[in-house]
Image (spheres, helix red, strand yellow):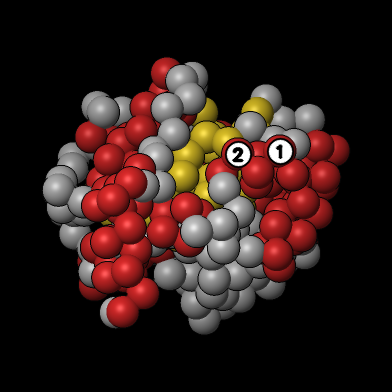
Amino acid sequence: MARKIGITSGKGGVGKTTLTANLGKALAKLGKRVVLVDIDFGLNNLDVVMGVENRVVYDIFDVLDGRCRIKQALVEDRFRKNLFVLPSNSFQGDYNVTGQNVKLIIESLSPVFDYVLLDCPAGIDLGFHRAVSCADSAIVVITPNATSLRDADKVISILKSYKLDQTNIVINRARGDLIVAEKMMSPADVESLLKTDLIGVLPEEDSVFLSSGNKLPKNTQSYLAYKLLAENIVNGSKKIFNVSSRYSGFLGSIRRSLRKSV
């Protein structure tokens, strides 16, 4: 049976959908069968980030309404035969979709895959609760700034009521140069503040923005960071990518200066 992970956030714009896509790719690279399910009804972008929007024939609403079988709605990734997307629909909204309706779809996918990643809506409205009710664990995506941390704290407190097997945080868009300069909270400080286990740190890097629909280049920090995140999820390890290492010491000070000037 698949592990069902709800990927959520307290606020929008923290990179939740991008993380869902790249984490799915990293898990698939480890040989796992993975399906990404877009439950962010009305504001769906997962198919675009995965680069499969032109190949979508059916979506999750077609499955819910009985117009197709789940297998017909799944879109296979261009690069990996063990990675699939179940897209949503930006036009229909969420009308009368219940958590039970969605849960039936997720449960039917569970025997076929190793991991079901649920791209949840941001915030704590109905869509959030509907999505989380389908998951057995959760990843809360945050950026290391005050508003994101405050909203993440609220989300984490609500997730506790669901009694999930596991709730972790992932810090996205971390800036090693700012952490070294003590202008951004360190991953350790964020973990301590939120009192929730940190499972990954992802650097702010242009390659992520340029990789929509494509593979992350292997020579990037982000590729290694996602690889470590996927290994942590599969193996239960806690190998956190160090975004600050290249900005320490003499050479690091030069890199910090160059980044300031860009």
- The front one of 141 and 247 is 247
Q: In this view, does 33 lie to the left or right of 242?
A: left
| Label 2: element kind | helix
**Is the residue 87 above or below the residue 133 in the image?**
below
Q: Mark 2 points at which residue?
A: 188
Pick the residue in front: 261 or 52: 261
Q: Position of residue 105 (x, y in %)?
A: 54, 44
Q: Do the residues labelled 1 and 2 touch (CB within 8 Å)?
A: yes
The answer to whether residue 192 is seen in the rendering is yes
Q: Residue at x 18, y 40 (%)?
A: 81
The residue that appears at 23% across and 34% down in the rendered structure is: 29
- Which residue is at a point 31% across and 36% down the rendered structure image? 227
The CA distance from mark 1 to mark 2 is 6 Å
- The disc placed on residue 44 is none
Say which amino acid is labelled 1: Ser
| Percent x, y of residue 79 | 14, 48
Give me the disc on residue 192.
1
Amino acid type of the residue that numbered disc 2 sits on in the rendered structure? Ala
The quadrant of the picture occupied by the C terminus is: bottom left
Residue 253 placement, left or right of 54:
right
- In which quarter of the view is residue 177 placed? bottom left
- Secondary structure under the numbered disc 1 in the rendered image: helix
- The crowd level at tag 1 (other Cα within 10 Å; few <14, some 14-19, many 20+) is few
- Residue nearest the viewer, comparing 30 with 63: 30
Give above or below for 55 relative to 192. Answer: below
- Indicate the position of residue 214 as horizontal and vertical percent values: 19, 59
Which residue lies at the image location 56% right of the left edge and 75% below the top edge?
A: 42
